[in-house]
Amino acid sequence: MKLKRYTAPDIRQAMSKVRDELGPDAVILSNRKIKEGIEIIAATDYDDAIVNTPLKSKQTKDTELVKPPNTKKLAEHLSNKFDVKTPEPTWKKALSDTYDTSDDFEHNIEKNTSQVSNEWINKLKSSNSETPEFPQVQHAEKNSQVNEEGLKNVWDELSNLRGLLETQLSSLAWSDVANRNPQKAKVLKHLLELGLTPEVSYELIAKVEDQKNFETLWRKCLATFAGQLPVVEDDMIKKGGVFALVGPTGVGKTTTIAKMAARYALSHGTGSIALVTTDNYRIGAQEQLRTYGRILGTPVKVANDAEELRKVLKSLYDKDLVLIDTAGMSQRDMRLTEQFSMLSEGSTLIKTYLVMSSSAQQKALEETVQAYKKAFLDGCILTKLDETITLGGALSTIAQNQLPIAYISDGQRVPEDLHQARSIELVKKSVAMMNEAKIHMDSNEVELAYGGLAAHDLS
C-alpha cells in the first residue's frame, strides 16, 4: 500500500489532487484541518475485492446495483486489509488520564474528580499569590466547568471522526457505482443536475431496469418521475367553488387570484365571481385586491376573523366562484395557527391551496409544506417559473409530499401566464431549463451528494 499526504485550502481541492494523482481507486485514510486549510492522507494499491465483498453476486437484481455498501462491514474489511491500528483518540486519552477506567471505575471517579479539581485550584493559587481562598461551592462550579469542557472536546472529536468516515464512504460508494454500472451512474448525475434531491434521484434510478443505452435509461427515469408527480386533473376554476390561497409573503397569491378570476371571467363573465381578503396585516394589501376587483368588475369583501368570514361567504351564496386572499406568513410565523383556524371555522366548503415560489430553495419549500399541511391542503400552485433556473427542488418537494399541483404561473400577465399543471410538461420544462442554464455538476459534487446516502446508513 502506498501512502501520500496532500494539502489544499479546502476539501474539494484536496480531493481533486488525490483524484488527479492517485486516480479514482484511491482511499482516504484521514483528513484534518491545518493552518494551510485541509490535510488528507490517501492510499492506493488495495484489493478491490475487499470493497466489493459486502455486495451480492452477479445475480444481484439491477434495482439493487446502486445501493450504498454496508458501512460497518466495509470498515471491518478496510481495517483487516491494512492492519491499521487506529491511534487512541486524544479525547479518550484525556478521559483515561482524568478518570480511572478499571473495574473500580465508579469507586474511583469521585476521588479522581476531586483530585483534578484540587490540582486546578492549586495551580491558580500558585500563579497569583493574591488569589483569595475559594469557598467550597466555587470549587464545585469550577469542577463542573472542567467537566463540561471535557465533554465538549469528546463531542468535537466524535464529530470529526464521523466527518472522516462520511468522506471515505462518499468516495468509495460513488466509485463502486461508477465502476459497476456506468450508465446508471451517468443518469444519476443528470438527475442531480436536474435539481432533484439525492433521495428522489436514488429512488428513481433504483426503479428502472438496467439499460445499455443511456438515452433509453434517461427517458425511462423521466417518465417514472412524471408518473410520481400528482396533479389536479380537472380545471377547478371551470367547476367553481370557494378557494383560499395560502403561503409565505411574496409568492404571488394576490396576482394568482387575479389571474384565476380573469380566466374564469373569459368563459363565464364577471357576474358570478367574488373576491375576499383576510389580509389585515400588510399595508395596502386590501387595496391591491380592490384594484383587481375594479378592473374585473367583481365585488371585493373583507373578513377580519372567522365570524366575519362566515357572514361574508353567506352573503355570496349566489356566486359560482369565490376566491379568498390570505395574509402572507412565514412558515415559522406563530400566527399561522390563527389563520388556519379562521379558514376551517369560516366554512367547510373552503378548499385550501398552498402557493409556492419555484425559485425558493428546496429545504425552504419542504419546511413551508410541513408548516402549511396543518391547514389540510387540497393542493398547491407553483409560481415564478420565469424567475428560476431549475424546477428540480420544487418538483422533488411536491413528489415527496404528494401535494397535487393545480396551476403553474410563469409571468405577470393576467391571465395569460396561468396554466393548468401537467406532469409530463413540467418534467419537459425542467429538462429544458437545465439545458438552457447549462448546469453541470463536477465529479466531487456528485460524489458528495450520492455519498451522503451511504453515510446516512450510519444513523
Image (cartoon, rainbow, N blue to C red):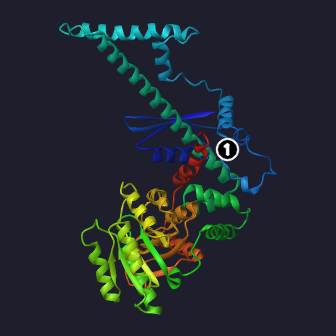
Q: Where does residue 400 sit, x and y in percent of width and height?
A: 57, 60
Q: Where does residue 79 sit, x and y in percent of width and height?
A: 65, 30
Q: Where does residue 201 sit, x and y in percent of width and height?
A: 60, 59
Q: Quadrant of the N terminus?
A: top right
The residue sitting at 29% across, 72% down in the picture is 285
Image position of 182 (left or right of 385)? right
Image position of 29 (left or right of 342)? right
Does residue 457 show up? yes
The residue sitting at 48% across, 73% down in the picture is 436
**Observer-nearest residue: 37 or 219?**
219
Image vertical order of residue 348 relative to residue 127, above or below: below
Query: Residue furthest toward the left?
Result: 130
**Observer-nearest residue: 7 or 257?**
257
Q: Where does residue 199 sit, x and y in percent of width and height?
A: 59, 55
Image vertical order of residue 33 relative to residue 439, above or below: above
Q: Quadrant of the C terminus?
A: top right
The residue sitting at 67% across, 32% down in the picture is 76
Q: Amino acid at mark 1?
A: Pro
Image vertical order of residue 165 relative to residue 258, above or below: above
**Observer-nearest residue: 12 or 250?**
250
In terms of secondary structure, where does tag 1 sit?
loop
Does residue 252 show up? no
Quadrant of the rendered image containing residue 74: top right
Quadrant of the rendered image containing residue 359: bottom left
Q: Which residue is mark 1?
A: 69
Label 1 crowd bin: few (<14), some (14–19), many (20+), radius 10 Å: many
The residue sitting at 77% across, 54% down in the picture is 61
